[in-house]
């Protein structure tokens, strides 16, 4: 559920344990539910989504959605968008913690004239991504913009 009061937003999710290392995550407004389990590194089978995978997916999906908002504001079209995300977990002060997260967003635009606009949208998405701004792990971004028809990659400033 989401309410907007005084610039505050509220989101909620429900979890129901299914036994062993499995649970179902749901929300009243969102379907379908998601089955989660521990990753193999923590005793799971590795066949379902883990909290660690959902965490990384939250970062990349929030980045993409923020990028799309700026693409619309800057007024250019995207032919495609993809993003790989990896996270490094380390033991810090006796607790596991994500210490580094690398995000590799790649936007495809229709023509060379939109490359600079897409690079600007990448910079703004990096600055304004809600999820990235809410965590304390170091996030290293490796943005790319390519022309869709040629798939010629042009690196943007990180």
Image: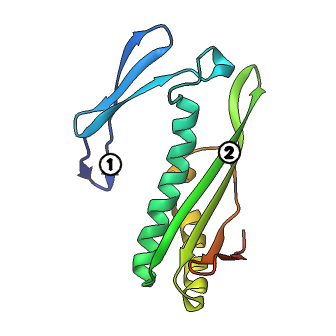
Residue at which label 1 appears: 9
- On the rendered image, what quadrant is the N terminus found in? top left
Residue 47, numbered label:
none
Q: Toward which corner of the image does residue 114 lie, by quadrant?
A: bottom right
Q: Is residue 39 left or right of residue 20?
A: right
Q: Answer yes or no: is residue 101 visible.
A: yes
Distance between the alpha carbons at the discs numbered 1 and 2: 28 Å
Tell me the residue at 31%/43% (across/down): 10
Number of numbered tags placed on the structure image: 2
Q: Toward which corner of the image does residue 112 lie, by quadrant?
A: bottom right
Q: Toward which corner of the image does residue 115 lie, by quadrant?
A: bottom right
Q: Is residue 29 left or right of residue 18?
A: left
Q: Position of residue 154 (x, y in %)?
A: 70, 78
Q: Answer yes or no: is residue 130 visible.
A: no
Tell me the residue at 39%/13% (across/down): 17
Q: Is residue 69 left or right of residue 100?
A: left
> SS at mark 1?
strand
Q: Position of residue 146 (x, y in %)?
A: 63, 76
Up the image or down, 50 lies above or below 114; here it is above
- Looking at this view, name the residue that lies furthest to the top: 20
For disc 1, the neighbor class at 10 Å (few under 14, some 14 to 19, many from 20) is few
Tell me the residue at 45%/83% (across/down): 76
- On the rendered image, what quadrant is the C terminus found in? bottom right
Up the image or down, 106 lies above or below 77; here it is above
Q: Position of residue 49 (x, y in %)?
A: 50, 30
For disc 2, the neighbor class at 10 Å (few under 14, some 14 to 19, many from 20) is some
Residue at which label 2 appears: 86
Q: Position of residue 155 (x, y in %)?
A: 72, 74
- Looking at this view, name the residue that lies furthest to the bottom: 113
Closer-to-camera residue (8/14): 14
Tell me the residue at 66%/70% (across/down): 144
Q: Earlier in the sequence, mark 1 or mark 2?
A: 1
């Amino acid at each position: 559920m989401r309410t907007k009061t005084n610039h505050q937003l509220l989101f909620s999710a429900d979890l129901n344990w299914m036994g062993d290392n499995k649970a179902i995550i749901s929300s009243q407004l969102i379907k379908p539910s998601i089955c989660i389990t521990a990753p193999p590194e923590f005793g799971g089978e590795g066949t379902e989504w883990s909290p660690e995978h959902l965490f990384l997916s939250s970062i990349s999906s929030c980045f993409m959605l923020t990028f799309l908002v700026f693409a619309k504001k800057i007024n250019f079209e995207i032919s495609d968008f993809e993003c790989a995300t990896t996270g490094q977990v380390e033991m810090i002060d006796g607790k596991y913690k994500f210490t580094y997260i690398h995000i590799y967003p790649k936007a495809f635009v229709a023509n060379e004239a939109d490359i600079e606009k897409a690079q600007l949208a990448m910079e703004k998405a990096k600055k304004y991504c809600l999820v990235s701004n809410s965590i304390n792990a170091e996030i290293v971004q490796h943005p790319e913009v390519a022309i869709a028809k040629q798939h010629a990659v042009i690196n943007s400033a990180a």
